[in-house]
Image: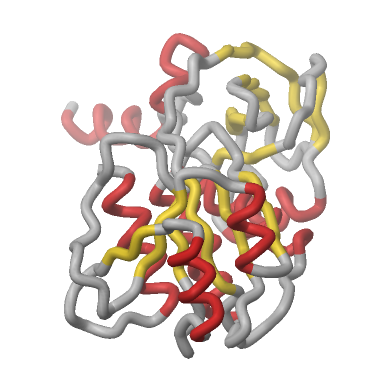
Amino acid sequence: MIKNQIKKTKRKKRKIKTKNNLSQLRYPIFFRKNETFSGELTLTREEQTHLKSLRLNDKEKILEFRNGQGSSAFFRFLENNQKGQKIEEISHNVEEPNISIAVAYAKSHALDLILQKGTEIGVSEFIFVEFHHSERKELNPVRAEKIFLQACSQSRRHSIPTLKTYSSLKSLIKSEKNLLYLHPYSKTKFNKPTEQIIPIIGPEAGFSDSELSLLEENQVSGFTLGNNILRIETAFLSVATILNL
C-alpha cells in the first residue's frame, strides 16, 4: 500500500502557478523598455539564451515583463515555445527613491560595477562628469543601458535609471542645483540629508586646484565619508547606500 502511494506521488507533475499567485513567481523578470504589451510576445535571442542557462527553456513557465514605467505583463510559455500568451497585466504605483549622484568616469571594471550595483541599490540618475584628472572621457550608452536592464531584473525594481553626462565640472554646476562634493580632507561628515541633493564624486586622482576653486566660488560645500581614501566605485556605492537608507 505504501509503495503504491509512493509511485503515485512520483507520477504527479508540478503544476505551474496561476495568475492567482503571480506576485510570488521567482522566474526571471525581463524588461522591454517603454513597450505596450499586446496579447502575444516573442522572446528575443538574448532572453532565450538566458532561459537556457537557467534550464528553463524546455519547461512550461510564466514570465514577467516590465516596461520600466510601472506596467508588468505576465505571459505563459509552453515547453520549447518562444511565443507566449498574455494572461494578465498589472499597473504598479511605483514608489522608489529619487537618488542622483554625479561621478567621474572610471575604468571599465569600476564603471560596470558603479552602473550595476548602483542600480541594484536604487540609484535613479547616474550623472557622469569629465574632470581634469579623469581616467577616461566617455562611456558606451548602449552597454550602460544593457547593464541597467540586467540589474533591474536582478533587483526586481520597476523603474529604469537614467543617464546624463557633462563635459566638465563647470557645465555640471551651471545646469544642476543642490550640489555638494565629497573630499577626504573635508571636515564635515556626510550623512543622509533632509532634502534632495546631488553628491559629486571626483576622480581617483582628485579634483584639480582649479576645480576646487570653482566649487568654492559657487558655494558648493564639501563633505567626507571618513578618514580612509576610497576608490571611486567604493565611494559611489557608499554614498548610494547612505542616500537609500
In this rendered view, identify the residue nearer to me: 122 or 19.
Answer: 122
| Residue 195 x/y as whole percent | 34, 35
Quadrant of res 39: top right
Q: Residue at x 72, y 71 (%)?
A: 139
Residue found at the very far front of the displayed protein: 217
| Residue 230 x/y as whole percent | 32, 81
Quadrant of res 187: bottom left
Vertical comparison of 230 with 217: above or below: below
Q: Residue at x 71, y 57 (%)?
A: 49
In this rendered view, identify the residue nearer to me: 127 or 68.
Answer: 127
Vertical comparison of 106 with 35: above or below: below
Q: Residue at x 45, y 68 (%)?
A: 201
| Residue 198 x/y as whole percent | 46, 50
User: The C terminus lies in which quarter of the figure?
Assistant: top left
In this rendered view, identify the residue nearer to me: 60 or 162.
Answer: 162
Q: Residue at x 76, y 61 (%)?
A: 141
Quadrant of res 76: top right
